[in-house]
Image (cartoon, rainbow, N blue to C red):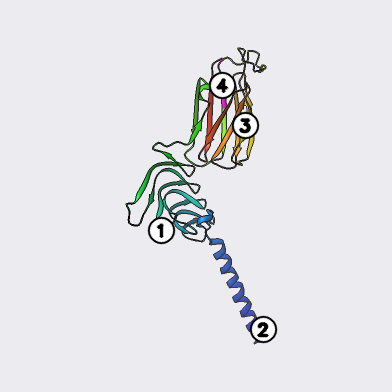
């Protein structure tokens, strides 16, 4: 009898262990620290994904992806302040409205566009570039979805007639290069690849966090800064007629 009871107890314990393991595997995590106390909603691979609602220091109701607010939703900071709009990787990104409710006074609302969790004004602005006058043409693009790389392509119309870059002193027939790049805001930047031809220089970097400010030095001694507000796969094309 005692043996039968022990076997039954062992079966029950194993069964509870299996259930507990299943519950643990199905737990849906929210990776945004201010929202990670309680979550109800859709889940994918153990992370909040799809429509859901999360609570913590703050409260968010809307679309999630990869454990963070991604897409349309409403983020409640407290009982009197909330932001309704679009989010990317847990940050305000795109068109939205921030509402401030005041007791005994009219409510106030800020409408416009945000990027990198910061209000950018009435137009959607995802970067700031101060080197426009250094180039004959430039083009800076970011993918709508999240990413963490930036590629620079620098083209010179004449290039090096021998196929070998010269000393970059500005004589006809040189290939302009990106000589150095430093990331501010405590970000880490890592070179992934470099390709060089007689008329073109191409380099790709990985960046670990956004927003980020990049300090760039060219092989001709010129310097410029590039502020990237949102996480994306960035493409920068710079053209010089020489």
Verify CB contact (< 8 Å) between mark 2 and mark 4. Answer: no
Region rendered in magenta: 153-157
Distance from label 3 to label 4 (Cα)?
18 Å
Residue ID at (58%, 34%):
214
Helix, strand or loop at mark 1 = loop
Q: Which residue is mark 3?
A: 181
Q: Where, by quadrant of the figure, is residue 173 drawn?
A: top right
Q: Which residue is mark 4?
A: 155
Q: Earlier in the sequence, mark 3 or mark 4?
A: 4
Verify CB contact (< 8 Å) between mark 1 and mark 2. Answer: no
Q: Earlier in the sequence, mark 1 or mark 2?
A: 2
Distance from label 1 to label 3 (Cα)?
44 Å
Quick check: can you spot residue 74?
yes
Mark 3 or 4: in front is 3
Q: Earlier in the sequence, mark 1 or mark 4?
A: 1
Given residues 160 and 170, the one toward you in this image is 170
* The stretch drawn in magenta includes residue 179: no
Q: State the predominant SS element of the stretch in magenta.
A: strand
Mark 1, residues whose alpha carbon is within 10 Å: few (<14), some, or many (≥20)? few
Q: Earlier in the sequence, mark 2 or mark 4?
A: 2
Q: Which residue is mark 2?
A: 3
Distance from label 1 to label 4 (Cα)?
53 Å
Residue ID at (66%, 86%):
2
Image quadrant where one finds the N terminus: bottom right
């Amino acid at each position: 009898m005692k043996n039968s009871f022990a076997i039954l107890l062992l079966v029950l314990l194993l069964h509870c262990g299996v259930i507990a393991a299943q519950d643990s595997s199905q737990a849906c995590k929210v990776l945004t620290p201010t929202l990670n106390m309680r979550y109800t909603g859709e889940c994918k691979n153990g992370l909040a994904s799809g429509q859901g609602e999360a609570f913590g220091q703050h409260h968010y109701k809307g679309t999630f992806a990869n454990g963070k607010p991604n897409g349309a939703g409403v983020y409640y900071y407290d009982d009197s302040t909330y932001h309704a709009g679009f989010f990317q990787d847990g940050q305000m990104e795109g068109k939205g409205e921030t509402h401030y409710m005041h007791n005994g006074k009219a409510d106030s609302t800020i409408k416009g566009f945000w990027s990198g969790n910061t209000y950018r004004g009435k137009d959607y602005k995802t970067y700031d570039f101060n080197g426009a006058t250094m180039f004959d043409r430039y083009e800076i693009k970011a993918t709508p979805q999240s990413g963490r790389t930036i590629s620079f392509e620098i083209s010179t119309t004449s290039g090096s007639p021998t196929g070998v870059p010269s000393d970059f002193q500005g004589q006809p027939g040189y290939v302009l290069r990106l000589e150095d790049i430093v990331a501010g805001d405590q970000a880490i930047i890592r070179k992934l690849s470099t390709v060089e031809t007689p008329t073109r220089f191409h380099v790709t970097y990985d960046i670990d966090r956004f927003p980020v400010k990049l300090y760039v030095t060219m092989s001709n001694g010129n310097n410029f800064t590039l502020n990237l507000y949102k996480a994306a796969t960035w493409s920068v094309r710079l053209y010089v007629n020489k």
